[in-house]
Amino acid sequence: MDEAVSDVEWSGDWVAERLGVELVGDGELRELLGLALRRNPKRAHLLVSNVLGKHVPQRPSVVHGVGFELGERVRDLLGEEEARRAVVLGYAETATGLGHAVADGLGVAPYLHSTRRPVTGVAQAGGFEEAHSHATSHLLLPEDPDLLNATAQGSPLVLVDDEFSTGNTVLNTIRALHARYPRDRYVIVALVDMRSEADRGRLAEFAGEIGARVDLVARARGTVRLPDGVLEKGRGLVAEHEAAHGQDAVSGSLAVSEPAMPRPAPLRVALDWPAGVPDGGRHGFTPVQRAALEAALPAMAARLAGALGDARRVLVLGFEELMYAPLRLGTALEDATTADVRYSTTTRSPVLAVDDPGYAIRSRLVFPAHDEPADGPGDRYAYNVAGAGFDAVVAVVDSTADTPALHAPDGLLARLAEHTGQVLLAVVPSYVPPPPHDWQEAAMLPEPLRGPAFSSYAADDVGWLLQDLSDTALEAPTEEREEAIQSGGAHYAESLPVEYQPSTQYQELFKAALDTSASRIARAVGTVTETVLAERGPRPVLVSLARAGTPVGVLMRRWAQHRHGLDLPHYAVSIVRGRGIDANALRWLAAHHDPADVVFVDGWTGKGAITRELAAALEDFGGFNPEIAVLADPGGCVRTYGTREDFLIPSACLNSTVSGLISRTVLRSDLVGPDDFHGAKFYRELADADVSGLFLDTVAARFDEVAGAVDAEAKELLAADRAPTWEGWAAVERISEEYGIHDVNLVKPGVGETTRVLLRRVPWKILAKRGAGADLDHVRLLAEQRGVPVEEVRELPYTCVGLIHPKYTRGATGVDGTAVTAK
């Protein structure tokens, strides 16, 4: 607690002595709260928080720390699994910053606060009334309509307010939301629980009434004892003080009316606020957006510190509902400077100011509203700023509020300039969600294909953003395809290789390899999924790169469901080397999900060509994160992976029969128009050989046995430096030159890519790491069947590397399709 809130004289003494009001409860209660008076027909007294950052300037780190600690307590109460599914809802205007700090303490929770500002084009998802407030209507305007939907999210709702007095506001909120979005659990969070004994029993009764669990987490507990007639007595005291001091508690004049110093001209500071990060939680704020803001805060604080110069006592002043952005700028400024930094915000709430150390509101600045509010013009207030000795004030507003009224002679900036030596203005861009169908053409695209009509996967395992080309003849002999591809006559995605039909010996080898490696794969699946959940938010949208990424995406979805009860959306899209990702699939995703929630998934990395391809393709599509999450990253190409070991992934051993009977994707101009998804085939005729379900079930059966190892590995990875090394790319370039190939596209590193060479292309030779062992049993068998030499190499960063034949004529192979090494 800040030393400023533990003065000998309590900041509630003035009201307590004159009204007979008593504040009783925890020993910390008087440090947390003071008392003031207001003209309000429902409640005369006002509990003034010393740690909320609304009426009383406080150190930003204290304000954020109190909310963060409450969030940690909520996380402990819910447990890690339920905490991952939680949604935090804060109350406007007073608790918008507190609620956001609670969401920070939970760590992985999206945040939304109610608002009194309607936003054109954003649908209202709910609303409620705050009975004792001077401004009662609260709107809920989430950008994501499913944010409050417990059926879709399976989420506890955490409601955050500064005080829990009668409980009416929170219970009314729960009742209204429960009727529309019923759920099993609610948690109420408040700085102080000030309910009377009579009110305390209502919470359990209410929980029974709606059939849900309702918990309460508070920093301190107590109650306010009010004598009879306190409301009338309070009104009289306010009127008496106004008459004696010429102060109107509603329209108001300054409690400190004389300018303290000449007015300096405000200095506008460009923050360079991070693109795509909302100004607050009015429309929702995701963990991904939180991470982006955290990364940008030091640079923004440095700009403010540079503009402040040698200012020693600084106030960061937020604006009504805009509490969190200025709060975090304040915490960053504390780290960036040795100045004494404080934080508070302006408010709609009219409160009597009394310049007495035993009263919580010592001074008041009054100025016109400057954000063109929907309920019309009116006065706004900044408390405990005048006469507080600040030699600089940083006013932080959103761009909606950066209006002529802000800069007017009687506006906020002019009022501040009367009482400080320096005024800085920092403007945060007001976030406006895009229209639900910003990409209008996406509305014309079809819904994803699903099994069993398309693929042997269950319908909820994956939605394929592809068009069905099953009835189109696309297969060509491997040698013809290779000649056309290498001669430049055709692209590899314009045709399909004839599906490899494994021999009985090879099928037995696959099953043995699956049994041997299932636990290893399960561990990697768990590790990459936990990393994604921790870093990309609790409800990512998995988008696998068809088709090697699709079995991994299904397994990640199953892990999230098995371990955390999460029902993650999963889609498969096409990406083609040299042609990019399916733009129509991206448009569909952007129309149905927040692009920031999309996590691209692949099976493994080789030299990183697809990683680079995806990054380049997404430059034209805002909002998508180009990082790929992979099961195995032997090439050191990504930062989100289950392992960087190059080992046998059985799903690489086969083609469609381990990938839902779906072919690789096809992109050909006569088949795929400008408004079509890329295409693929469903090989229904191969159902008897399908082992897609066997692969998934065998790996998923090992989830429980690897859970402990996954928790340890994920924790270690999250704390480690996982920056891509691109070691694989360097190795491929070296091999390409050493073997006289001079084309990195013909060098396919890693077990998975080598297997693809043997199944689909014209292989020249295989480089195998000496002592690789059972991971290469299937590679050796395939190489033997195709007459491809296997060359053991001492120093190789991969377990093996497949080299495509650099002579692209059909003479590169014999009539039986095996390699002709003498060529």
Image (tube, helix red, strand yellow):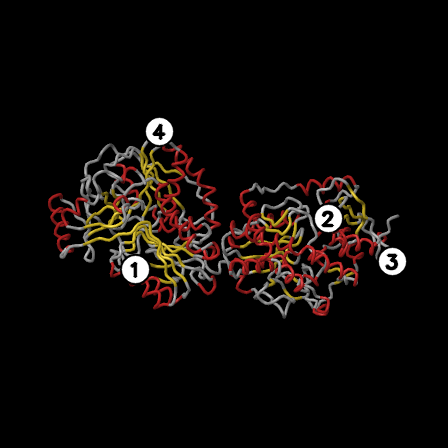
Using residue 766 as the reference point, say whether residue 177 is left or right of it: left
Q: Secondary structure at mark 1?
A: helix
Which of the two marks, 4 or 1, is nearer to us in this view? Answer: 1
Mark seen at residue 815: 3
Q: Position of residue 818 (x, y in %)?
A: 84, 55
* Residue type pointed to by label 3: Val
Using residue 542 as the reference point, say whether residue 31 is left or right of it: left
Q: In this view of the protein, which residue sits in the foreground, 260 or 362? A: 362
Considering every residue shown, the one lying at the far top of the view is 310
* Chain-order first, disc 1 or disc 2: 1
Question: What whole-number distance in Å separates the C-alpha atoms at marks 4 and 1?
Answer: 45 Å
| Residue 90: quarter of image | bottom left
Question: What whole-number distance in Å separates the C-alpha atoms at marks 3 and 1?
Answer: 81 Å
| Residue 113: quarter of image | bottom left
Q: Which residue is mark 1?
A: 169
Q: Is residue 358 visible?
A: yes
Which of the two marks, 3 or 1, is nearer to us in this view? Answer: 1
Q: Residues within 10 Å of mark 4 (few under 14, many from 20)?
A: few
Q: In this view of the protein, which residue sits in the foreground, 436 or 159? A: 159
Question: What whole-number distance in Å separates the C-alpha atoms at marks 1 and 2?
Answer: 63 Å
